[in-house]
Amino acid sequence: MTDVLPLETAASTAPARRRTRTPFRVRYDLVLAGAVLLVIVLWAAVPQLFTSQNPLVGVGAAAHQAPSAAHPFGTDMIGRDLFARVVYGTRSSLQATAVAIAIAFVASTVIGLVSGFVGGVLDEVLMRVVDVMLAVPSLLVSLLLVTALGFGTTNVAIAVGIGSVAAFSRVLRSEVLKVRTAAYVEAAAGTGARWWDILLRHVLPLAITPILALVALEFGGAILAIASLNFLGYGAAPPAPDWGGLVSDGRNYLATAWWLTTLPGLVIVAVVVSANHISRVLGESR
Amino acid sequence: MLWYIARRVGYALIVVWAAWTVTFILLYRLPSDPVSIMLHGAGGEVASRASATQRAALAHQYGFDRPVIVQYFLLLGRALRGDFGLSVQNHLPVAKLVGQALPSTVQIALLGLAFALLLGAGVAIAANYSRNRFLRGLLFAVPPLTASFPTFWVGLMLLEVFSFRLGWFPAVGNDGFRAAVLPAITLAIPAAASYAQVLSRGIEKTLREPFIDVVRAKGAQRARVHLVHAFRNAMIPALTLVGLTVGGIFAGAVVTETVFSRSGMGNLLQASVNSQDIPVVQILVLLSAVAFAIVNLAVDLVYPFIDPRIARPAR
């Protein structure tokens, strides 16, 4: 008698309590992170809306100026507006990131799905190869690929994409395993559902949030890796701006013009922090 | 215990061999022509002057005119005998070039690792020990934030503040301890960020374990509970992480040495990628796998001293 009662009340009040405990709350941190990423995407899509300055041609008289109202990020050594260069450099940086994520995502989805779904010897072999790839840091794998493929924005993007396949497919595999062994998926298989039906209707909806979290994380990582390779000088050819290249250009004027390295670097930091934050919140919300 | 050691050593050897194989495939078997890349790396005019016979000679030297499997075992056999080929750029033996570059990088890597361990452990212990809510929140929030900083940017910021503004450390160069401090800090920051995160979470979790209540009930001081009991139990995952991030420190050295204009393996790798010097690039990347294997072997051998259950056969 006494042990039945609490059980009943717990069962009847639990859903109601949950409803009142999670009212809709504005997550200001998420709004801010999303706003940063939205602005970056707009910079890439319509740079001319954000600055009227020319990113490639400088005004000699305006060279070497600290940040001011006219030039929010200051000007470089030949009088080019740094803010305009950052804004116009966004497109090539984001395109490279998109290519890198697409490659990493497609390759590791195939590996992760096959490994986690088929299992057995194939899983064993694939995961040992991934282990070896993980022994070499992804930046070094990218450098190896840049050596073999040659320089340029596209090759850097391919190199970064392939460089992150190992870590990416490891996580995807564990997600696939988690869902595949869930009781309701086994139940669906037991009722005779076909495998693509299971994949599309049962596995995918549950896996979509962790996958999005992973993509956001990979976005931050790819931005960092591409900026590093561009900083080392393997990216876009000189007059065209890109983020890592801008920081690299400013290196020679570190003692006299702090803004040339600090401000483009801060833009990269803002983007990566935002992407990582979104990734973490999505990862926790499961 | 002996069986445990033998298994770990065997595993380290397999990792190195497999890494060599992967670098071989990526560098020599991608749909590109290594002979052209090497000639291109040796300079534009060399590439255009090279006759068909010279190309064939270079291809023969590396065995490119033979079947893939023969090439593979030819180069692997040479590597096992310590012959890693010649640098395409300056025709010096690769082993000699790498040997010259090694000490300077090992110096900043070890110093960086020491900074990272001190900083990571310090932040993690302080974050859990502190009773001030604001300080606690700050110490938990800062590590994931610094992990998103680009390494090259961190290095440049340190240079700007500590070399150019304050003049505490030399901005460039290799000589002495003072020149190694800023590069080492640059390497340490991302590593310290991940150690701090894992250690903070580990200590936080351990402090909720029942055995901590027992220790407290027996009258242990707060500091003793945190430093001796909680910290020791949080060390295993952090140690695993140290093994995993050592390769990352070497990758960081590529960027860091470029920022601080230091000579070393990172700088050599950057220059070699620039001139597409395939043999040098391969050995340098392989070395990161060797470092990874050695450090993880060391970590595996230290585990049983921290947690004796690990080396015991699972029965």
Image: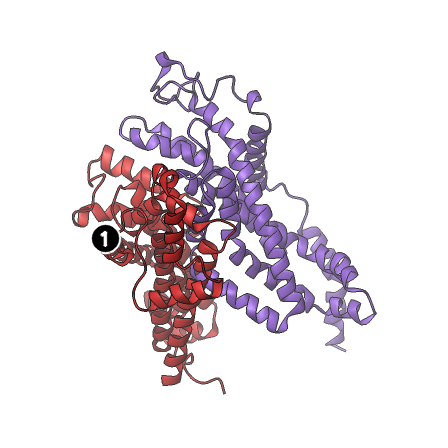
Chain letter of disc 1?
B
Image: A239 above or below B168: above
Q: Which residue is drawn at 37% across and 37% down?
A: B44
In the figure, residue A269 lies in which quadrant? top left
Count the numbered circles shown. 1
Residue at x 26%, y 29% (from the top left corner): A255
SS label for mark 1: helix
Q: Which chain is red?
A: B
Residue B279 in percent (x, y) is at 36, 54
Foreground residue, B52 or A243? B52
Tell me the residue that label 1 is attached to.
B104
Residue A282 visible? The answer is no
Disc 1: CA contacts within 10 A as few (<14), some (14-19) or many (>=20): some
The quarter of the image holding the C terminus of chain A is bottom right
Residue B288 in the figure: left or right of residue B22: left
Query: Which residue is depicted at the point 47% across and 71% down?
Result: B209
Q: The purple chain is which one?
A: A
Q: Which residue lies furthest to the left in this view?
A: B176
Image quadrant in which you'd find residue A135? bottom left
B260 up-or-down from B95: above or below: above
Q: Where is residue B214 in the image (x, y as percent from the top left)?
A: 42, 76
Nearer to the camera, A105 or B65: B65
